[in-house]
Amino acid sequence: MEWDDELDAQGLLCPLPVLKARKRLKAMAAGQVLRVLATDPAAVIDIPHFCIEAGHTLIGSGEVGAAQYYMIRKG
């Protein structure tokens, strides 16, 4: 899967991964994909919830090394 931008939020704790993703997505065009890397255990709940609330689509997630990744298509 390809993405247009990547946010490395590894080592950041709630709510910083979501806040930084929100800021990065504001600068992107609708339909573009942001890949977020996070190590915060709460991200598995926070990022999908953020996508629903903000009108974005979580199109994929998984693990890469010690981090989780989240693929967010801007709404």
Image (cartoon, grey):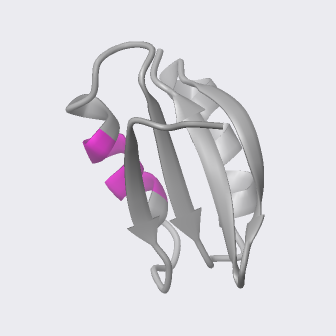
Q: Residue at x 62, y 78 (%)?
A: 39
Q: Which of the 4 image quarters holds residue 58?
A: top right
Q: Return the x and y of residue 34 as percentages of the image width and height.
A: 46, 40
Left or right of 26 on screen, residue 7: right
Q: Is residue 58 above or below residue 43?
A: above
Q: Residue furthest front?
A: 2
Q: Residue at x 67, y 40 (%)?
A: 49
Q: Inspect the magenta stretch and tell me whether residue 22 lies in it.
A: yes
Q: Is residue 71 above or below residue 70?
A: above
Q: Return the x and y of residue 42 as percentages of the image width and height.
A: 69, 69
Q: Residue furthest left?
A: 27
Q: Is residue 1 above or below residue 18?
A: above
Q: Which of the 4 image quarters holds residue 59?
A: top right
Q: Is residue 51 above or below residue 13?
A: above
Q: Return the x and y of residue 9 as percentages of the image width and height.
A: 44, 70
Residues drawn in magenta:
18-24
Q: Residue furthest right?
A: 62
Q: Residue at x 61, y 41 (%)?
A: 71
Left or right of 60 on screen, residue 15: left
**The N terminus lies in quadrant:** top right
In this view of the protein, can residue 55 be seen by the observer?
A: yes
